[in-house]
Each structure stands twice: as structure tokens, then as C-alpha cells.
Amino acid sequence: MDDETLRILPDTHKRNADFINAVLPYKQIGLEAGKFRKGKLTPAHPLALSHLLANSVPRQELSYEDAIRYLRKDDVTIENTQHTGWVIMTYQDIALGWAKFLPNRINNYYPTEMRLRKEIL
């Protein structure tokens, strides 16, 4: 497997985590920040929702209709955007998740298992 998960754990919790792991091994600890795939980092959904992101991470505000489309994992079209690369999709300044802006399209990285299935519009 060529995937490597990157996790974030504050230094203040490291000692406690080591102590707990000695008694009760854990599978995961900390915040999943992303996975390295073929030498590139793909950011994880929990990172998009965390308070750890810098304000310099690009964000794209969505209308209600576009936010619902994004949450359904449907195609979202943004006119006149300056963004390229990884962008946080937001609705009313609330982070929804990641999208990757490419020159000719937007790839929706909202987790498939969390997508909306009911018709809301």
C-alpha cells in the first residue's frame, strides 16, 4: 500500500497518548490531516472542519443551492473564481469540506458516505 496517513496530535497530549497506548493500544489518535498518495498530500475531511487551518487556506463561499449540490456530491460550477488547487467550500462562513479546483472543472472531495441522498431543493 502506498498511502500514508498524516495525523496531528498536540505535544501536550503525546505523553498521555504514549501512556494509554502502553495499556490499551489504539488504532487512531489525533486529527487526520490527510494522506500521501503518489508523493502528494490529499487533505482529509476532518482537517477541513477543524479550527487548525490557517486563514490563508483558500475558501469558496457557496449559495444555498450550490451548497446542497456540493453536499450531494453533484457537480458545482463556480463562475469567475481565482482559485486553483485545494479549496475549502463554505456556506455562510461554515466549512463544508474540500474541493480541488482545476482549470476546467472542480473535483468534489466531500466524503461519499456522508453525502445527502434526499431531495432537499
Image (cartoon, helix red, strand yellow):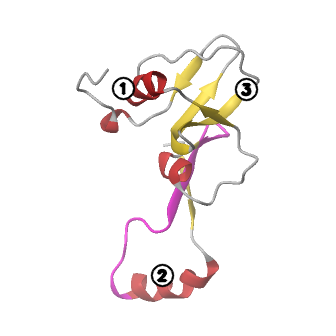
* Residue 100, placed above or below residue 97: above
Foreground residue, 96 or 30? 96
The residue drawn where x is 51% and y is 26% is 63
Mark 1 vs mark 3, CA separation in Å: 22 Å
The residue drawn where x is 60% and y is 75% is 10
Residue found farthest to the left: 118
Is residue 69 rendered to the left or right of residue 61?
A: left
* Residue 37, placed above or below residue 14: above
Q: Amino acid at mark 2?
A: Ala
| Start-end of magenta stretch | 23-42
Q: Residues within 10 Å of mark 1 (few under 14, many from 20)?
A: many
Q: How many marks?
A: 3
Q: Secondary structure at mark 2?
A: helix
* Residue 32, placed above or below residue 83: below
Foreground residue, 70 or 10? 70
Q: Which residue is mark 1?
A: 72
Is residue 112 rendered to the left or right of residue 5?
A: left
Foreground residue, 80 or 14? 80
Q: Which residue is mark 2?
A: 17
Q: Which residue is mark 3?
A: 84
